[in-house]
Image (cartoon, rainbow, N blue to C red):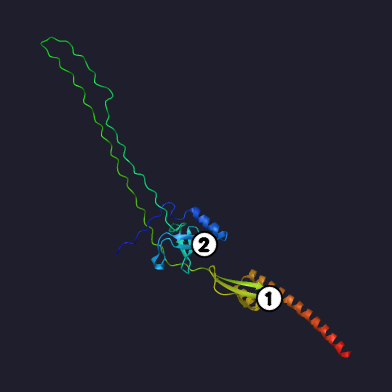
Amino acid sequence: MSAPARRRAPRPGEALSAEDLATLEAGLAAGRRVTVYLREATPSLGLEAGASARVISVDGTTVTVSPKGIDDQLPYEADELRLSKDAPQPARKATKVAPRTAAARPTTRPAVVPPVEAPRSETPVPEKSAPEKSVATPVLAPETSVKPTARPARRTKAQPAPVSVTVTSGPDDQWTVTVSHGAKKLAKPSDVTADRVLRAIRELGDDVASAAVEDKIEAARAAAVERVEALSRELDEARRALDRLKNE
């Protein structure tokens, strides 16, 4: 069995830094659309390297995105994303040249001693100069590069988005229920009656929520009673006016 492929570690400026993550969080907080790009392809999802993805949320170094063409939200690590579509060009390394040490030269010349006059029967012997010493040039060892340790393959299974159920009260004792999957609403708000809302809230066992719903329903009930009384008075007046017209 062959070993899993090793992913190349990002170069400086190629992956999201801590400053980049802070910029993304600020953009989301301001309500702007924030976009990042994939460093490497994901063949199982049909995503190529450099594919754009809209940022949904940032949690530490984990960035949840919605890639273009994928109707889902996927978590990625910061070193798997970058801000630009194209990868930055690697900087050229300067070639180091080993310095050469010139051979040492003698700083002084051998002294020349004038010949001493001697009897003609003897021949003067010339002095020999000291031989020059050579200095070896040092050889520098070549630089060795250390390969980065391969990280384990990223899980392609996406985490499910959170589901939220919102109950909203409107005018005239109208109540609606909205269901959302992440940032996407699954359907239009549906109307529900006040008694069903009160039963559902009481089943949850939340005293604060139950009290808020009961106050809202009680206020709507009081307004309805006042409305009925006002209509009853108007009806009585209309009947008396009709009786007067019949007697005339």
Horizontal side of 42 relative to 167 (left or right) equals: left
Please give the name of the residue rendered at 79% of the width and 79% of the height, measured from the top-left corner: 230
Q: Which amino acid does label 1 sit on?
A: Asp
As rendered, which of 27 and 141 lies closer to the eye? 27
Local packing at callout 1 (Cα closer than 10 Å; few below 14, some 14-19, many 20+) is: some
Horizontal side of 53 relative to 219 (left or right) equals: left
Farthest residue, direction right: 248
**Disc 2 on helix, strand or loop?**
strand
Q: Residue 49 carries which label?
A: none
Horizontal side of 197 relative to 81 (left or right) equals: right
Farthest residue, direction bottom: 247
Local packing at callout 2 (Cα closer than 10 Å; few below 14, some 14-19, many 20+) is: some
Report x, y in % for residue 23: 52, 55
Q: Which mark is residue 57?
A: 2
Please give the name of the residue rendered at 39% of the width and 66% of the height, measured from the top-left corner: 43
Q: Residue 173 carries which label?
A: 1
As rendered, which of 110 and 169 lies closer to the eye? 110
Please give the name of the residue rendered at 65% of the width and 72% of the height, measured from the top-left corner: 169
Farthest residue, direction left: 121
Q: Disc 2 or 1, which lies upstream in sequence?
A: 2
